[in-house]
């Protein structure tokens, strides 16, 4: 899957939430992988612009684009 979140998002979370934010970021790849597996999604790039969520492009097993 590559890089999960952009550096600006990681920096914002670390600045705003300190060690708890860094701990959450550390769990993010595993969480996204679990959700992708459960819902049979292929995850793509992060969609930029949000500050309180990690939103990525995705495709279903049938090729439908989803967010």
Image: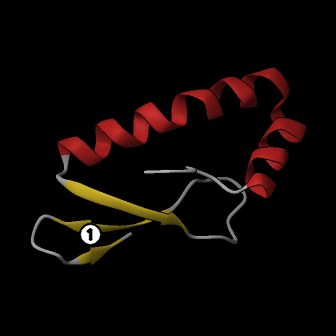
Toward which corner of the image does residue 58 lie, by quadrant? bottom left
* Residue at 55%, 49% in the rendered image: 4
Toward which corner of the image does residue 37 lie, by quadrant? top left
61 up-or-down from 15: above or below: below
Q: Residues within 10 Å of mark 1 (few under 14, many from 20)?
A: some
Question: Residue 53 location, x and y as percent?
Answer: 60, 53
Question: Could you tell whether 4 is left or right of 43 in the image?
Answer: right
* Residue at 70%, 71% in the rendered image: 49
62 up-or-down from 26: above or below: below
Question: Could you tell whether 32 is left or right of 61 in the image?
Answer: right
Tally the marks.
1
Question: Could you tell whether 16 is left or right of 35 in the image?
Answer: right
* Residue at 42%, 51% in the rendered image: 1
* Residue at 73%, 28% in the rendered image: 22
Q: Residue furthest front?
A: 2
Q: Nearer the viewer, residue 43 or 21?
A: 43
Report helix, strand or loop for mark 1.
strand
Question: Residue 40 location, x and y as percent?
Answer: 17, 52
Question: Residue 3 location, x and y as percent?
Answer: 57, 50
- Name the residue tied to disc 1: 59
């Amino acid at each position: 899957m590559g890089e999960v979140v952009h550096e600006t998002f990681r920096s914002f979370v670390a600045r705003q939430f300190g060690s708890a934010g860094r701990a959450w970021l550390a769990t993010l790849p595993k969480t996204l992988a679990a959700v992708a597996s459960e819902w049979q999604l292929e995850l793509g790039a992060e969609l930029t612009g949000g500050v309180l969520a990690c939103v990525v492009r995705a495709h279903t097993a049938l090729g439908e684009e989803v967010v």
